[in-house]
Image (spheres, rainbow, N blue to C red):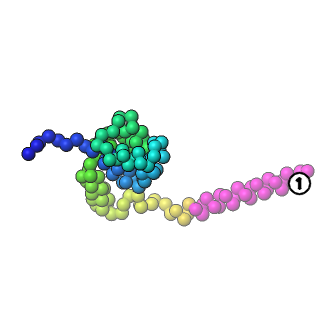
Amino acid sequence: MDTATKPKHIGRNISRIRELKGMKQEALANAIGVSQQSVSNIEASETIEEEKLIEVAKALDVSVEAIKNFSEEGVINYFANFYDNSSNHGAIHANNCTFNPLDKVVELYERLVQVEKDKITYLEKLLKDK
């Protein structure tokens, strides 16, 4: 049995990161200025030129190291830990609002109405002065 470590498949890592970000091949192709078929070829390649890898990383908004070191197990562990931590504290922090959104909408609306009233008052004053 061979104990040599198999090199990471960079193209497959790019594909998985792109999919996890909800990005289509066409969108990645547009971002790096190539065709969709070129992205398909990149994702099928085990290795990629460093310059192209930098472009892809920038388009995916990740580091080159994140692409090179990507692992399915790491993603699973990340989300498992996230779920464990959030469930230990009750509600997920993203949904733990400290204000009533409806109050904010009403406040904004009232401020907009007041600005319009101030405009009307100013315009009436200008007309009266003429």
Q: Quadrant of the image for the N terminus?
A: top left
| Label 1 sits on residue | 128
Q: Nearer the viewer, residue 81 or 30?
A: 30
Residue appearing at x 58%, y 62% in the figure: 105
Magenta span: helix, strand or loop, mainly?
Answer: helix
Classed neighbour count for the residue bearing mark 1: other residues with Cα under 10 Å, few (<14), some (14–19), many (≥20):
few
Residue 90 percent location from the top left of the image = 33, 63
For badge 1, the amino acid type reads Lys
Is residue 39 shown to the viewer in this render?
yes
Magenta stretch holds residue 52: no
Residue 127 percent location from the top left of the image = 87, 54
Q: Is residue 109 left or right of residue 27?
A: right
Per the image, label 1 sits on a secondary structure element best described as: helix
Magenta stretch holds residue 108: yes
Which stretch appears magenta?
Answer: 105-130
Residue appearing at x 78%, y 57% in the figure: 120
Question: Vertical placement of 19 versus 67: above or below?
Answer: below
Q: Residue furthest bottom?
A: 102
Q: Nearer the viewer, residue 75 or 5?
A: 5
Residue 15 percent location from the top left of the image = 35, 50
Residue appearing at x 48%, y 42% in the figure: 33
Is residue 85 shown to the viewer in this render?
no
Q: Is residue 127 left or right of residue 8?
A: right
